[in-house]
Image (cartoon, rainbow, N blue to C red):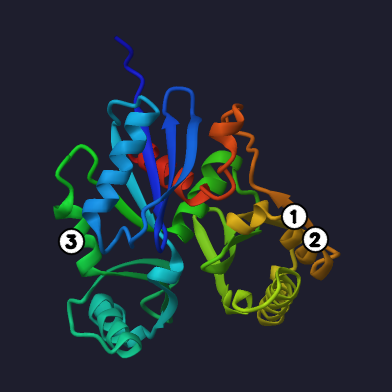
């Protein structure tokens, strides 16, 4: 009997699941796919599980070692927060107060996590705050009938991509990663184990416009955010951009993006130095779209 452990990473969309199966022994992505659910997976856990189970049966994957879930930044809260020195001793209380200010939600409506990025109690700290709606977390934890498929960990796609870049390609210095999906564009500047900056660009420009016009607006919005980031911190002057997401597979979007960023080398995240990808077209077609799912599975593999 083989002792190979297979890990499943999932990124939830508005009405879809992006999935990736990874072989831990060979550090290899076996399959990727985008599964349509018709309803929000986080709000309709029954359909979430049904669609996922049907896919696993279709690819003849009887069981998985563990499942990790990644939630898009657009469906969560990700903020870099400055905690003043006088509040560092009660950091969690301060962050809960801050979260209440920006959400205007009842206390306990969100599950919060955080990571101290820099600073100390004498001068204050810069903290990465992450929050997800409690009802979604509880629904996923309690709603799965097959407990073997219930996600063991949940994280935000920003952290999934940070882990993917570090585990699969070894981050060396500062890197810029853009995740371009139809739901929105997330831009991040990362170094090893650290998110340096996070910016978002709305995709509302895609509505009621031709593809050429919409992608032009979107590419210009990305250009604008890159310029703003550089103005805020001159060290963000990178020469390469790593690109993933659904729009990375669209030639027209790529044409507009390269036109807006002529001085940058745009590197598609479809190959890695320390991670094998599937070679069959059916299994590799969704690699760019499923980068968050791959990173979530890798993170779980490395924690075990």
The reply to whether dot 2 and dot 3 touch (C-beta < 8 Å) is no
Observer-nearest of 280 and 262: 280
3D distance between C-alphas at marks 2 and 1: 6 Å
Is 135 placed left or right of 32 in the picture? left
The front one of 275 and 237 is 275
Q: How many C-alpha atoms fall within 10 Å of the one at disc 2: few (<14), some, or many (≥20)?
A: some
Callout 3: helix, strand or loop? helix
Q: Secondary structure at mark 1?
A: helix
Seen at 61% across and 27% down, the residue is 279
- Mark number displayed over residue 251: 1
- Residue 47 percent coordinates (x, y): 26, 52
Callout in the foreground (3, 1)? 1
The vertical placement of 43 against 93, above or below, is: above
Q: Is residue 96 left or right of residue 24?
A: left
- Mark 2 lies on residue: 255
Percent x, y of residue 182:
56, 65
For image coordinates 29% across by 25% down, the residue present is 62
Q: Is residue 132 left or right of residue 23?
A: left
Around disc 1, counting alpha carbons within 10 Å, would you say few (fewer than 14), some (14 to 19), or many (20 or more)? few
């Amino acid at each position: 009997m083989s002792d190979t452990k297979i890990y499943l990473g999932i990124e939830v969309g508005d009405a879809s699941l992006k999935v990736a199966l990874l072989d831990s022994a060979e550090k290899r992505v076996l399959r990727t796919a985008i599964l349509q659910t018709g309803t929000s997976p986080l709000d309709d856990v029954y359909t979430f599980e049904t669609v996922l189970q049907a896919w696993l049966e279709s690819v003849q994957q009887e069981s998985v070692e563990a499942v990790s879930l990644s939630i898009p930044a657009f469906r969560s809260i990700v903020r870099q927060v400055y905690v003043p020195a006088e509040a560092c001793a009660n950091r969690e209380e301060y962050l809960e107060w801050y979260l209440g200010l920006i959400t205007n939600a009842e206390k306990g409506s969100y599950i919060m996590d955080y990571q101290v990025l820099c600073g100390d109690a004498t001068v204050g700290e810069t903290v990465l705050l992450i929050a997800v709606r409690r009802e979604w977390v509880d629904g996923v934890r309690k709603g799965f009938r097959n407990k073997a498929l219930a996600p063991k960990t949940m994280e935000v796609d920003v952290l999934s991509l940070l882990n993917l870049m570090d585990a699969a390609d070894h981050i060396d210095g500062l890197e810029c990663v853009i995740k371009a999906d139809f739901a929105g564009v997330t831009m991040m500047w990362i170094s090893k184990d650290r998110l340096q900056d996070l910016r978002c660009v709305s995709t509302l420009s895609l509505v009621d416009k031709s593809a050429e016009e919409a992608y032009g607006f979107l590419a210009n919005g990305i250009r604008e955010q890159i310029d703003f980031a550089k103005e805020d911190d001159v060290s963000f002057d990178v020469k390469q951009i790593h690109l993933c997401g659904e729009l990375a597979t669209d030639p027209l979007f790529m044409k507009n993006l390269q036109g807006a960023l002529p001085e940058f080398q745009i590197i598609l995240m479809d190959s890695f130095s320390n991670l094998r990808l599937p070679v069959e077209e059916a299994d590799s077609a969704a690699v760019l779209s499923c980068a968050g799912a791959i990173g979530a599975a890798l993170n779980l593999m490395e924690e075990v």
